[in-house]
Amino acid sequence: MTEELLTTKEIAEKTGLDLRTIQRWISDGRLESRKIGRDYVVTRSVLDDFLAHPPATLRAVKRAKKQ
């Protein structure tokens, strides 16, 4: 079975996070991804694990959005 792949745009839409934040996490190596053509993609399991154990910056972003 093939695992679902999500583009950075899809991740931003599903999570409500800023696209640039997701791109920065990929660039910094904090979010594991693969490049397919011109797009970076993240597997659903990697994204779920990342969101289950968020870095401090993700917690700060979520707090700021609540205010």
Image: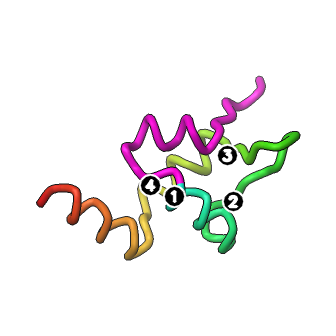
At label 2, the amino acid type is Glu
| 53 or 62, nearer to the observer | 62
**Dots 1 and 2: beta carbons under 8 Å?**
yes
Which class describes the residues within 10 Å of circle 2: few (<14), some (14-19), or many (20+)? Answer: some
Q: Mark 3 points at which residue?
A: 42
**Dots 4 and 3: beta carbons under 8 Å?**
no
Q: In this view, does 7 lie above or below 28?
A: above
Image depth: mark 3 or mark 1 in front: 3
| Segment tinted magenta in the rendering | 1-19
Left or right placement of residue 56 versus residue 62 in this view: right
SS class, disc 2: loop
**Dots 4 and 1: beta carbons under 8 Å?**
yes
Q: Name the residue under label 1.
A: 50
Left or right placement of residue 57 versus residue 8 in this view: left
Rendering coords of residue 62 (x, y %): 27, 60
Q: Which of marks 3 and 2 is nearer the N terminus?
A: 2
Q: Looking at the rendered structure, which numbered label has been put on residue 36?
A: none
Q: Looking at the rendered structure, which numbered label has been put on residue 32?
A: 2
Name the outermost residue toward the right: 37
